[in-house]
Amino acid sequence: MERKIKNSILELVDDDITEMETDAIVNAANSRLQHGGGVAGIIVSKGGRIIQEESNKIGHVPTGEAAITTAGRLKARYVIHAVGPVWRGGGEHEEEKLRNATLNSLKLAEGKGLKSIAFPAISAGIFGFPANKCAGTMLSTAIEYLKGETMLERVVFCLYGKSSFAVFLKEMEIQLPC
């Protein structure tokens, strides 16, 4: 499913983010940039230890911020490590922090001159962020960004599994009806 926004494409796919052929993929990272488990662990496993080694040099990244490393053996050229919030019921500005993590990833990609980026559902896994709120926040942030002046040509939300894809699809149809 895709929608055109000005000169860019916003796309939803149900796929493995480590197989994406975009300039960058986004890793839903922890603030210490330790990529031991979940998707982060798989990214390092498939991409190589260089990703963890470069992350170690960066060190700490605050919630809502992002950092970039090379992507080792992955098809993407870079990995953007976005630190999303742990869901604590919504009273600790979690949606704003997720919006910032998404926006800072887009800005980081643009600053590197990249043309395409693939996002997972940041914070919707072990960080407990409700999937519908995650979809609404991330999509609205990307849509707003693409409506501005950008050189990004393609923003992909690479979702793992039919249920996650369905939640993002429903939200995209609300925010960008045909």
Image (cartoon, helix red, strand yellow):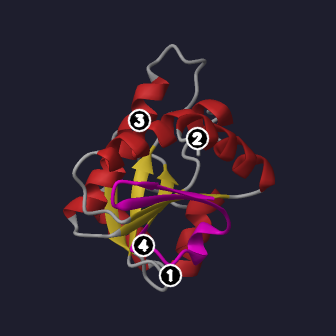
Highlighted range, magenta: 1-24
The percent position of residue 6, horizontal first and vertical second, equals 34, 54
Which callout, 3 or 1, points at the residue further toward the start of the chain? 1
Reading the image, the residue beneath label 2 is: 177
Whole-angstrom CA distance, mark 2 to mark 4, is: 38 Å
Q: How crowded is mark 1: few (under 14 residues within 10 Å), some or many (20 or more)?
A: many
Whole-angstrom CA distance, mark 3 to mark 1, is: 26 Å
Q: Which mark is residue 51?
A: 4
Height in image: 167 above or below 79? above
Q: Measuring 68% from the left and 67% from the top, which residue is drawn there? A: 15
Q: Quadrant location of the N terminus?
A: bottom right
As drawn, the residue found furthest toward the right would be 162
Q: Is mark 1 on a helix, strand or loop?
A: loop
Which amino acid, mark 3? Arg
As drawn, the residue found furthest toward the bottom would be 73
Height in image: 81 above or below 137? below
The percent position of residue 101, horizontal first and vertical second, equals 39, 42
Front-lying residue, 105 or 33: 105
Q: How crowded is mark 2: few (under 14 residues within 10 Å), some or many (20 or more)?
A: few
As drawn, the residue found furthest toward the top would be 91
Asked whether residue 159 appears in the rendered view, the answer is: yes
Which callout, 2 or 1, points at the residue further toward the start of the chain? 1
